[in-house]
Image (cartoon, rainbow, N blue to C red):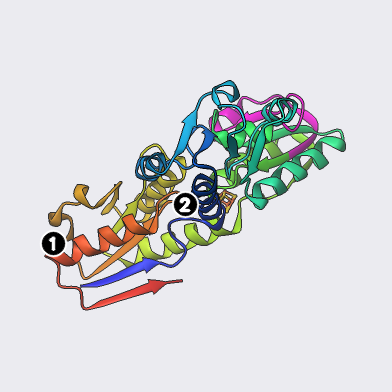
């Protein structure tokens, strides 16, 4: 059997840097606090908890003087303001590509456009982007786009991990409703690469495995993209969930992972497959 592992699967640089910063800060300060999970992956959150990186619901729960880490996917302007007013020790792990989306959405807003954000309702990143401007509209699906009213000037950005297919479909619909439309494609480049490799592999391989938490919108989206191209596509959170029958008669197996899946879990899965399958070739796929 041949194993092809998508080169850009797993942690993107934004998540990797944020997790590294959490470890470093916990080591230096004894502990560090975060508003919500740093990544949508239970294993990573549990490991971080063990070294003193704690999740809190509100800023008031952070003990005096202890660092608060703002996560890769951004923090609302209100929380930033409140933390600064409280004189908190802020460790900013916001991904530079998320900051870029904040800047783009503000620029579109300053042109007097009605702002539309294509993304998942309630997702931390989308909430953070929405907080940059007044009264943005969040659109997550073509059905929601159909329900929009006619608009004169529209500015659109999207959540960094959206699929280009969902964004294109939604924009095609908005085009029928807007007179003057400006779209800034804010899907980030690690997501674009990861999605392209996943699509290629799904078509090439007999079986496709996507490793990622079911709480991660990004991992679920990858699984959906794979399923559209290959019925034998499976999402697992870790090696224990793999069933050896999936690989019966498979000659090529593809592996991809969401942006919040750590390397250690990807390696566990590869090792697990090697326990029951005869792997002759193992290659990275770019
Ligand atoms: S998915 Fe993209 S935007 Fe989000 S943290 Fe990773 S690199 Fe940054």
Q: Residues within 10 Å of mark 2 (few under 14, many from 20)?
A: many
The Cα atoms of the two marked residues, 2 and 1, are separated by 28 Å
Tell me: 126 left or right of 250: right
| Quarter of the image with the N terminus in it | bottom left
Q: Name the one closer to the observer, 99 or 154.
A: 99
User: How crowded is the residue under tag 1: few (<14 C-alpha within 10 Å), some, or many (20+)?
Assistant: few
Numbered range of the magenta stretch: 131-155
Numbered circle sitting on residue 219:
none
Residue 231 colored in magenta in the image: no
Q: Residue furthest top?
A: 60
Residue 127 on image: x %, y %? 62, 31
**Residue at x-position 63% and y-position 43%:** 91
- Pinpoint residue 174: horizontal percent, then vertical percent: 68, 36
Question: Which of the two marks, 2 or 1, is nearer to us in this view?
Answer: 2
Q: Is the CB of mark 2 within 8 Å of ligand 1?
A: yes
Residue 146, position in %: x, y? 60, 29
- Residue 43 shown left or right of residue 10 in the figure: left
Would you say residue 148 sits in the magenta stretch? yes
Q: Is residue 48 left or right of residue 18?
A: left
**Residue 93 in view here:** yes
Looking at the picture, tell me which residue is in the foreground, 147 or 161.
161
Q: Image quadrant of residue 142?
A: top right
Callout 1: helix, strand or loop? loop
Residue 92: image location, x then y, percent: 65, 44
Outermost residue, right direction?
111
* Residue tagged 1: 248
69 versus 196 height, above or below = above
Which residue in the protein does label 2 denote? 259
Front position in the image: 87 or 16:
87
Q: Residue at x 53, y 35 (%)?
A: 34
Look at the numbered discs 2 and 1 and tell me whether their residues touch, using CB distance below 8 Å: no
Tell which circle, 2 or 1, labels the residue nearer the N-terminal end.
Answer: 1
């Amino acid at each position: 059997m041949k194993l092809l592992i998508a080169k850009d699967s797993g942690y993107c640089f934004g998540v990797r840097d944020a997790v590294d910063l959490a470890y470093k800060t916990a080591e230096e300060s004894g502990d560090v606090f975060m508003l919500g999970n740093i990544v949508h992956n239970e294993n990573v959150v549990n490991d971080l908890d063990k070294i003193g990186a704690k999740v809190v619901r509100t800023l008031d729960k952070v003990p005096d003087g202890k660092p608060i880490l703002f996560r890769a996917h951004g923090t609302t302007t209100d929380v930033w303001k409140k933390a600064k007013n409280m004189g908190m020790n802020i460790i900013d792990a916001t991904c530079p590509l998320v900051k870029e989306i904040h800047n783009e959405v503000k620029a579109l807003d300053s042109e007097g456009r009605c702002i539309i954000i294509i993304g998942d309702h309630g997702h931390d990143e989308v909430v953070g982007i929405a907080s940059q401007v007044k009264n943005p509209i969040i659109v997550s699906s073509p059905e929601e786009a159909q329900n929009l009213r006619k608009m004169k000037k529209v500015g659109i950005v999207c959540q960094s991990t959206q699929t280009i297919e969902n964004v294109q479909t939604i924009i095609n619909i908005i085009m029928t409703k807007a007179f003057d439309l400006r779209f800034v494609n804010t899907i980030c480049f690690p997501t674009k690469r990861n999605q392209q490799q996943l699509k290629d592999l799904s078509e090439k391989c007999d079986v496709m495995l996507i490793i990622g938490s079911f709480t991660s919108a990004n991992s679920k989206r990858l699984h959906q993209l794979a399923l559209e191209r290959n019925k034998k596509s499976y999402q697992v959170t870790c090696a224990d969930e793999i069933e050896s029958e999936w690989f019966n008669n498979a000659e090529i197996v593809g592996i991809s992972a969401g942006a919040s899946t750590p390397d250690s879990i990807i390696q566990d899965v590869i090792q697990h497959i090697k326990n029951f399958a005869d792997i002759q070739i193992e290659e990275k796929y770019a």
